[in-house]
Each structure stands twice: as C-alpha cells, then as structure tokens.
Image (cartoon, helix red, strand yellow):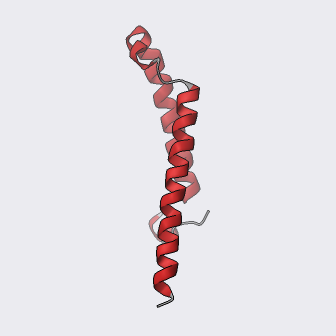
Amino acid sequence: MKRFSSSKDTGAPCRRCMVLRIFLGMVLLVIILGLLGGDELAYLRYITTQNIGNFIMISGVVIFLVKLCFWYWDKKHRKI
C-alpha cells in the first residue's frame, strides 16, 4: 500500500494505518454494542455467519462483473 502523496507534509497517516484504525474501531463498536444491547438485540439473530458469507460472495461477484464490464468498455473505446 502506498502512502498518500502529501502525507509527509500534512502528517496524514498512510492508507494501511487508516484501514487498521477503521477495522479496530468497528470491532470496538461491535463489542460495545454487544455488551450494552443484551436481549434487545434479539431481532439481529437472522445475521448469521452463513448469511454474511453469502452476502460477501454475492457482492464480490457483482463488483467483479461491474469492473469487468468497465474494463471491457474502456479497452474497446481506447482502440478508437
């Protein structure tokens, strides 16, 4: 992963650090939500690992197909 082009001037963190911060923040949010929610989160029981896995696979295939279409379209128009 590359650093931002002007990160040394502005002091902005690198992209890897930003991804790690967001991930750790989401993990902390889930932990706090689980501790504070208790029985009130019963309506979230349909969110299972199988459903999350299905969502990730389906969204990955859709994103791949969209990127493939854009790549093909871009390749076709650059030949002209």
**Depth check: 7 or 75 in front?**
75
- Residue at the (49%, 36%) spot, across then down: 26
**Depth check: 77 or 60 in front?**
77
Q: Is residue 11 above or below residue 43?
A: below
| Circle count | 0
- Residue 51 place in picture, x, y as percent: 53, 29
- Residue at the (50%, 51%) spot, across then down: 62
Residue lying at the far top of the rendered structure: 39
**Does any portion of residue 52 appear in the rendered image?**
yes
Residue lying at the far bottom of the rendered structure: 80
**Does any portion of residue 13 appear in the rendered image?**
no
**Depth check: 33 or 7 in front?**
33
Q: Is residue 75 above or below residue 55?
A: below
**Depth check: 52 or 41 in front?**
52
- Residue 55 place in picture, x, y as percent: 51, 38
- Residue 43 place in picture, x, y as percent: 39, 16
- Residue at the (47%, 69%) spot, across then down: 70
- Residue 68 place in picture, x, y as percent: 53, 65
Displayed quadrant of residue 2:
bottom right
Assign the N terminus to one quadrant of the image.
bottom right
Residue lying at the far right of the rendered structure: 1
Q: Is residue 29 above or below residue 16?
A: above
